Image (cartoon, grey):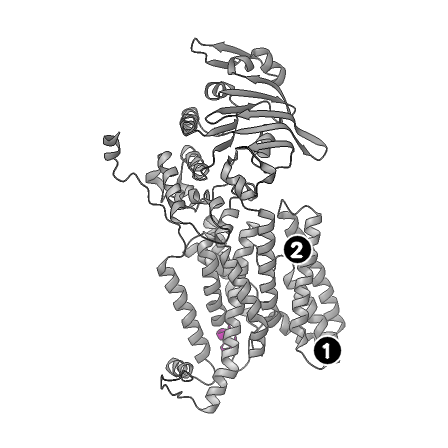
Amino acid sequence: MIELEDIQVRFGATTAVRALSLKAEAGEWVALIGPNGAGKTSALKALAGLVRFEGRIAVADRDVRRLSRRELARLVAFVPQKPETPPELTIAEYVLLGRTPYISPLGGERRSDLEAAARALQRLDLAGFAARRLGSLSGGELQRTVLARALAQEAPILLLDEPTTSLDLGRQQLVLELVDSLRGDGLIVVSTMHDLTLAGQFADRLLLLDQGAVVAEGAAAEVLSAPNVAAHYGASVRVVEDEGGGVFVLPVRTR
Amino acid sequence: MAAVDAVRPEATPRVAARGVGLGWSLAAAAFLLGSLVVGLSVGPVRIGPGSIVESVLSPIPFLHVHSPLDAVEHAVLWQLRAPRVVLAALVGGMLAVAGSAYQGVFRNPLADPYLLGVAGGAGLGATLAIVYGVASTGTDAIVPLAAFAGAIAAVVVTYALGRSAGAVRTTGALVLAGVTVATFTAAVQTFVQQRHTDVLQNVYSWLLGGFSTSTWRDVAIAAPYILASSLVLVLHRRVLDVLSLGDEEAASLGVDVARTRLVIVVVATLGTAAAVAVSGLIAFVGIIVPHTIRLLVSTSYRAVVPLSLVVGAGFLVLTDVLARTVLSPAELPIGVVTAFFGAPFFAVVLRTSRTMR
């Protein structure tokens, strides 16, 4: 379980995130949405311990300020929007880097680390790819590999910053379905997302941020209203709901 | 379900932590050993490899190996060549391993151990010692100490300057601070040198580097720093791979990036300063050796760091052999030899920079 209480993130004079509170239980997927500069990524980075914040963040009932960097890395895995993927590394080597929080700083991998990496590769159907180099992978394969590295971290919380950027429509669905399937093991997913329709279809709950503050929160049908999107994205949209409860946000040309 | 699993007999992928393979380890060890033998046997007095081995084994009791060398040969081998060869190996290994570590920490393939002002500081320290110290103390033993102190002082200034410019999060400010300090120390050094043209030759020959006057005393001064520094850097080889993912991802994997970077920079600098103090400024070793290994073996620091140490040692021993034989009996400054071979080599590396990281 994670719990954020009244989180503020500041960079100098600008406040990127203000008064953010959030709770997520095992198996839940929460999506942070909002226009560019709304503070989505900063909120995610606060949760990953990568930026200073005020307020309180508890992960698995432990205050993250009292955790060492290594301890936090065993609880929270973070996938940035543009992960660094050295092209010469093999997939196996790259995924093994995900075991860093369990490996002594000056030591090497143990058998359990190799096994965890193998499990992660298997989970993401990358078993046949282990010896391939990152530079030889397509965008979709690369994104799966990055997910495998995060999974090898065996953390109960997975943070994804725009997991579908630069993927085509089919790969976007594939990756999101993959993430969705991981939740079966009790994984908590917190992601930032640009595509509102996909966010609504995959996340249990949406948090709409604007200028660092939460302006709407709840299920897709409650948050993704045309007035909400117009007010905070400055976009003209039509929102279509289907009978199954799905919400489709369609841009409408105004001129 | 069992049936589904059964159709995928090779379901478990093979995951291995790739380090240095046995083949490359043996090749690197053979290269170093061969270089040492060549370094010890080549010179005006030729001593065959067999005689060297017998001379090495002769002091060991119960082996009953007798050294075939006469007194002069024995003195040439053990008082002239051996300290020179050992020191070249130590310095070469140190410069190469420090170069590989710097390239990893700064994520810049052009980073070399002199990046943060070690060379400029050492050069200034040595010049001041030669100009003002040697005459007043009557001994040139203070030159290495002054070079060492100058190198450390320059890097401390670089680090303080870089930190105040925000280098904790980005390495760019630190590199710029290094350039600033290096330029300034070079200016002061040149000024002092031009004001004292009587010692120009001495300053110059120190700056170009070499082992023509190496003694066991130099080995004793530098070896502790170099061995300790190399060991720490080799132990950090996996962390260097993690750092190649960038500061943010390394931090999210539990690495204290700022502290790790500081430790590696301090350790590499101490070792480099000790090497520079006893050998002068030897260019290019810190760049060509790690890049050759990247091109031939692997870009993973698990291979690059330990192999740089071994191959760098052998490389500088061989370079020193060239330096003292090409114009024999005169000696070429070793810095000239490394740069003469290093520059064309580096051009090749740049042309194939697709694989450079």
Quarter location, residue A177: top left
Q: Residue B339's spot in the image, x, y percent?
A: 54, 65
Magenta range is B320-326
Residues at marks 2 and 1 touching, judged by CB atoms closer than 8 Å? no
Q: Is residue B123 left or right of residue A58?
A: right
* Marked residue chain, label 1: B
Q: Residue B65's spot in the image, x, y percent?
A: 36, 85
Residue B277 is covered by the magenta coloring: no
Hey, what amino acid is under mark 2? Gly
Hey, what amino acid is under mark 1? Asp
Confirm whether residue B87 shows in the render: yes
Q: Disc count in the image?
A: 2
* Marked residue chain, label 2: B
Quarter location, residue B330: bottom right
Q: Which residue is mark 1?
A: B198
Q: Earlier in the sequence, mark 2 or mark 1?
A: 2
Secondary structure mostly seen in the magenta stretch: helix
Q: Which residue is mark 2?
A: B178
Q: Is residue A242 above or below residue B162?
A: above
User: Residue at the location (54% across, 53% down)?
Assistant: B103
Q: Residue A105's spot in the image, x, y percent?
A: 51, 51
